[in-house]
Image: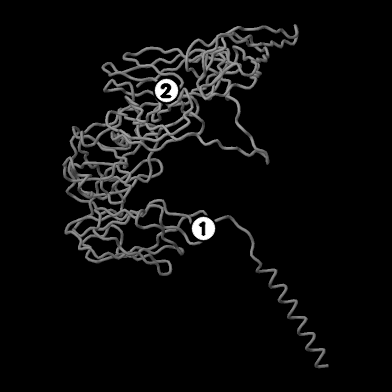
Amino acid sequence: MRRDVNTLLWLVLLVLTAGCARIVAPVGGPKDMTPPTIVKEVPANNSVFFTGHGFKITFDEFVVLQNTTENVLISPPLSSQPTYSLSGKTLTVKFSDTLRPNQTYSFAFANCIKDFTEGNPIPIYNYSFSTGSYVDSFMLKGKVVDAVTASAVDNCYILAYINNVDSLPCTTRPDFVTKSQKDGNFSINNIPSGQYKLFALKDVNNNMLFDQPNESVAFFPQTVAAIPMPRTDTITDSTRAETVSSRVQQFDSECVLRMFEEADTMQSYVKMQNKEAGKYELFYKNKISDPHINVLSEDTVSFFPIIGNDTLTLYFKQIPADTVTVEVAANGKCCDTLKLTPFQKRNVRTRGKRENKNFLSVTPLNQGELYKPLVLKFSYPIHPVDSFEVQVVSIRRQSGNDTSYLRLSVPDTFVNQVVIPMKWEEKVSYNLFIRDSVFEGYNNLVNDSIKVNFTAKTEKNYGSLHLSYKLPAESPSYITQLLGEKGEVLMEKAIHTSQVIVYENLPEGKYKIKVIEDSNGDGEWTPGDYRKSRLPERVFYFPKQIFVRGNWDLEEEFQL
């Protein structure tokens, strides 16, 4: 009997346990997307007569703190970094600096306080206190943009100085500091009223000084007047707020700091590249000007230099069999002695087989375009050709195929492309054929047989853009640029007065318009120079992307 009772009790317990498990099983729910909430601050935010060496912030949930060195901005900056510790849901901040009397201090936590479970950050949290009788209630605000692209610049330092000395950002840490947000906007809060010198800095070595040649900088040419912060119940406002004169420059979100990297005028040789016999590419740090090549070795060699933006390419007319020593000078100052060693032939494996490059490479350009000629581009400059034949097969659905022959020549020496001067008919398919060994490069390679197949476009594939540029009454020269969808410059023209530019026969697609204010008239964009108090030349972008439709004339107006 006792055994039966024990068995019955075990069965009851199993049933109850199974039932309980079904009741408390976890269920799915919406993901937590809410950042932590502050429930307590000790001392209270915007406290006055502060005498301590730290403060505490308590949240409604457990938090983590990330990268305080870069993401906690303290104004005015402290000489040593505070310490941060977490206990439960409370963050404790301690510092050892002796605080200035009658000074407002602000701690800005930018995206570094996150909840423990989902990592939701508090975008910006400001904690301020004053060692005096009031918390300063003025601010500086604005936006940082790239001087060339006009796009927002985030995560750069904004430096504010009370004094107005030209060398400030190069020698002195700022009086107040903050960082720009993702949209480029910034605000320096809880500062005294008055005039400030304002800078933005991409600080490479993280010392809040403009002291590296590759650091980007922005500056406002005049001092800037701080403006009153919006009133809130938690701010202890100074009753001594001054009336800002209408003559003083107000710096708000409509004013911008245009960031640039100063031009590096020191030229230097970087490296050499030799990917094929007879071709040597010399790369330089900056744009090349006025190159001079002097052969130092005893060999008699002949070559043609091609100047790129920052690349000098040497094509030899006779492939060097031995090392050639040359002295290359560029930009009037940079001079290097280089050894051009003979090309080492490399075999390329393709799917287990070796592929030897025995032919001169030929690339067709502008296939099927109505308003651009077909161009054959060679990988190496070629010798003149007295005469060669191009077989052209026209394929028409209704009338069948038609074969014609073009007789052309290459009279010039050392060219790397040949134009096929033929007008194509709309919607007609073409097969072009040129036999092998017609073209011989100076690298001793000849072409394989050339076959080009395409169907000509129609006029419905092209449109036109009529753009009216409206310039200020008194304006310098401007450089107008039509850009492709990827930002490449398609057409460029300098203008001095308001006018309409017609861009005809544009392939259907998306375009952008860029205008450079060419203040010094050198035909290109010029960056700023802080030490010379020169701002970067302004760049304007048409406020919307332009879509050119086929067989359509589009009219737009660009008011600068």
Quadrant of the image for the N terminus?
bottom right
Circle 2: residue type: Ser
- Circles 1, 2 touching at the beta carbon (< 8 Å): no
Q: CA distance from mark 1 to mark 2?
A: 67 Å
Q: Can you name the residue that lies furthest to the bottom here?
A: 2
Q: Is residue 21 above or below residue 212?
A: below
In x, y percent, where is residue 370? 58, 12
Horizontally, residue 292 falls left or right of residue 358, namely left
**Residue that numbered label 1 is attached to:** 118
Question: How many C-alpha atoms fall within 10 Å of the one at disc 2: few (<14), some, or many (≥20)?
Answer: few
Horizontally, residue 152 falls left or right of residue 409, namely left
- The disc label shown at residue 546, or none: none
Name the residue rendered at 31%, 48% in the picture. 178
Circle 1: residue type: Glu
**Residue that numbered label 2 is attached to:** 302
* Foreground pick, 432 / 248: 432
* Foreground pick, 220 / 30: 220
Name the residue rendered at 73%, 9% in the picture. 401
